[in-house]
Structure formats: structure tokens, C-alpha cells
Image (tube, coloured by chain):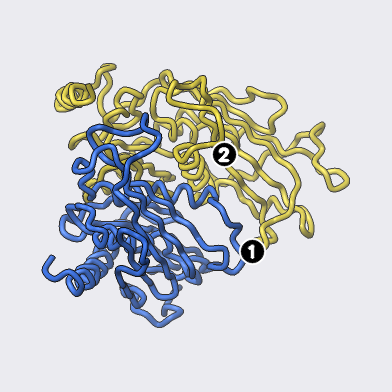
Amino acid sequence: MYKKRFDNRKFDESRPIEATISVVENATGSAHFSLGNTKVIAAIEGPKTLHPRRIQDPERGLVRCTYDMMSFSVDDRKRPGPSRREIEIGLVMKNALQPFVLIKEFPKTVVDVYTEVYQADAGTRCASICAASLALADAGVPMRDLVASVSVGKVGDKIVLDLTKKEEDYEEGATDIPISMSGRTKEISHLQLDGCITLDEFKKALDVGEKGCQEIYELQKKVLKEKYGGV
Amino acid sequence: MDKNLRKFVLELASKNLREDKRKLDELRNIEIITGISNKAEGSARVKIGKTDVMVGVKMSVGSPFSDKPKSGVLMTGAEFLPMASPEFESGPPRANAIELARVVDRGIRESKMIDLEKLYIEEDKVWMVFVDVYIMNHDGNLIDAAALGAIAALKSAKMPGYKDGKPDYETRTNALPVKLTPTTTTVSKIGNHFFVDTNQNEEKIVETKLVVTVDDKNIYAMQKSGEGTLKKEQIIEMTEMAFKKRKELLKVLK
């Protein structure tokens, strides 16, 4: 029985969220995003001509994502260079973001999205997607919606929002469901699950996840409005 | 071209039909042969229609992960062989192959199909279980074929003996500690229709996929794949389809 959360949060409460944009001088757009102790920087380069030319699409552009955990971001040093996990997350991030980017407006090009996790306490892919979405907006890349992302899950017998590493490792078992949802149209572009959960619990978790994404979306809008005015 | 294909597939789908005369929720014929390589601890060849995969399980003795010192190690890899499709090139696995391997791995791991704690041998020595998937021919639905092959190979595996701190491949007696049989189903969305077991032609126009691993009661792993999006209700409907398909998959796994 998980009666009270380790950090005293309510079960459907996310960790403190902070977001800032335009944090990397040389990038077309960038953002910093923190979800409690999980901290990420995202930067955009492009749209720029895609090479090699044979992979260019004359009808649409491409979003390419690189997810990287810095070696010192975790307890046991992570070996630099892309791991299988990071390559998979790069693909998952691309599938989370690209549906909302108006790629037909910049054919034959690529938008590179780089995310760097420098402090990890679970939810790193979600924080990366939140940061990337803001960075894309900051770069002025045409989009039809913003994407917010948070993990929801089951710790012991409770449905909880935004799991910490300690909660993911809960000894009686935890289920982790990172989801990404567009703020305005509420389309889910990313969903993963690992653990053990019934269909009924999963339905509840989706509702809690939607609420979490909406809260992040409000913050994303606020941050963009502060710099660019009406959105 | 793909626009015409999409129109054609959707027109048929509205009558619950597909180009190969199947219904939208109908699987192709599935054939599983186990024991295809006598050097492997367990192996299987799975054919779903023209899709063909070979899976082998090898075991060795190694050190556990530092955070789980009493637990065996499971590792899953996948190779998309160039012979399987003109789209596949030789070289290290690309993102799609890595995704496939990791999704299959999560289904096995999270369902606790294999009791990894029973693979502890002694201080700093555990069994390492390597599951390797080779795609021999690509006609769609690769993840389900790979998962089915991995599950069949693990179920058929016989553990090597243990002598002087090393595996003894001459004596293979005990089965792996298999606790349950998970099943993995990919449900694909084209337009507003949901398909199972898509062939390669259909996959050219699949917008979004949801891969779901379940047993009779629980969901153990999920992955939304592909470049589209889904609504909450659609995800639930697709998950329910995965539960429904389980019975048929169990029948072929026996």
C-alpha cells in the first residue's frame, strides 16, 4: 500500500515545473525545462537543407531528434555516446513532435532537435519533449499545436502523476506511462508503458495524464506569451 | 501512389475488407517451429503470412547489474537482414531495429515471463539470457512476429548445465523458469480504421501503431509508434483489441 508520496505531493500533482526559453545563444531556438529534479535543455537547428540529398522529401520536411543524457546526470556515470535507449527515445521524440510541425511548409529540409539531460530524476523523455516543443516555438518553426508531456503511472496501488526515480523503483512495483499530448487538440502523439496495470486502471491513468499535460501546456503558453506577446 | 493505395485500402476497410480478403481484425496464417538450431538453448522460426523471423536464445554466465545483484540478465537484440527487404541495409542496427528489440524486450521483462531471480547462481554469477531476433523476410507486422518468436524460443529453451563456474553446453536439462505467457499485438490505424497484422503494403500508409503486451488480465507494455496521433478513446479501443487477439495467439503458441 502506497499511502503517502515520498515527497508529500498529492497523487495527481506534478513536481514543480519551470520553463525558460532562448537559453542557447547560437541555436535557432531553445528552452530549459525542469520537472522537479529532472532538468533538460533543448535546442533547435534549422530548418536547413537535408543531406544526403537522396533522403530529401520534395513534399515535406523532417524533424530529427537527438536525446542525450550527460555522463554526470545519473548516479552511475553514463558512458558518453548514444546508447540503444537514447536512440529509441530519439525516435519516440520525433514521433511525439513531428505530427504538430507543419512539415509541408519546408520541404527537403530537416529541423534538428537536440536535447541534453543534465540532471535526471525520472521523466527525462517527458521533460525533453516539453522543452523541445517550447524550443521549436522559440525557433519560429511553424506548428499547429504545442506538445506537453508527463509520465503517469501506478505506484503500489495508487494512480500517480509524474513519478520520481524513487517511485519508479518502488519495491511493491510501479508502472510507468510517459505520455505526450497536444495542448489544444488533445491528441496523443507519444505513449509508452511498462509495468503491470489493468485496463480500468490504465483508463484512469490516461485521465490523470491528460490533466498533467494540460497544466504543463498552460505554463508553456505563459512562457511564450511573456516573450512574444499574444499567441 | 500512396494516395491511391490509401484510397483503395480505406474503401475496402469501410466494408471490413482488405486487399488479401481478410477482415480488419483478422490475422494471417501463423506457423511456429521451435528447435531450429541445436546450438541455441532455445529457438523458433515464426511465419506470419510471408513475414519470416528466426529467434534464438543463448545463455552464458556473467556478472549481474550492480543495482540487481541477485537477478539474472535478459538482453534482446534484433537484426533486420538485408535479404529480408530492399529497404534494409547492412551495418549496425538502425533506430527501427532498436525500437523493435526494445519493445519485444519490455514485453518479456515487464510481464515477468522469465523469473530472473531464479537465474541467480552464486555471488557475482548469474545467467545471462540473450534473445536475438533475425528478420528473414519482411511482409509487415514485424514486432508481433518477433515477440511471438522470442516467446516461443524462451518457452522451448533448455538451460545449460553449470560446471566449474562455466556453462556446460553438453548437458541441457532444465527449462527456463517461465511464469506466464504474454502476447504482443500491434494495432495499426489507417484513417479511422484499426487493423491487426498489417502486411507490408498496408504499412506504407499506416499512420500510427500501438503495440500492446498483455496476459489475460494485465497490460505489461505499450508503445505508440509511427508519425500520427491518437485520441484517448482510440487508445482504449486498440488496447481492447489486443486483449481480444490474445486467445488466437495463445492457440498458436500452445
**Quarter placement of the N terminus of chain B:** top left
Q: In this view, does B172 lie above or below A199?
A: above
Distance in Å between CA atoms under marks 1 and 2? 22 Å
Nearest to viewer (mark 1 / mark 2): 2
Residue at the (59%, 33%) spot, across then down: B153
Of B11 and B5, which appears nearest the observer? B5
- Amino acid on which the number 2 mark rests in the picture: Gly
- In percent of width and height, residue A76 lies at 62, 65
Residue B218 seen anywhere in this rendered image of the structure: no
Residue at the (65%, 55%) spot, across then down: B117
Q: Name the residue under label 2.
A: B77
Q: In which quarter of the image is residue B211?
A: top left
Q: In which quarter of the image is residue B35?
A: top right
- In percent of width and height, residue B182 lies at 48, 42
- In percent of width and height, residue A134 lies at 28, 63
Q: Mark 2 lies on which chain?
A: B
Q: Name the residue under label 1.
A: B67
How crowded pointer 2 is (Cα within 10 Å; few <14, some 14-19, many 20+) is rated as some
- In percent of width and height, residue A27 lies at 35, 60
Q: Is residue B84 above or below residue A119?
A: above
Q: Quadrant of residue B90?
A: top right
Q: Residue furthest front?
A: A26
- Amino acid on which the number 1 mark rests in the picture: Asp
Q: Mark 1 lies on which chain?
A: B
Secondary element type, mark 1: loop
- Colour given to chain A in the rendered image: blue
Is there a contact, CB below 8 Å, between mark 1 and mark 2? Answer: no
Of A79 and B73, which appears nearest the observer? A79
Image chain in yellow: B
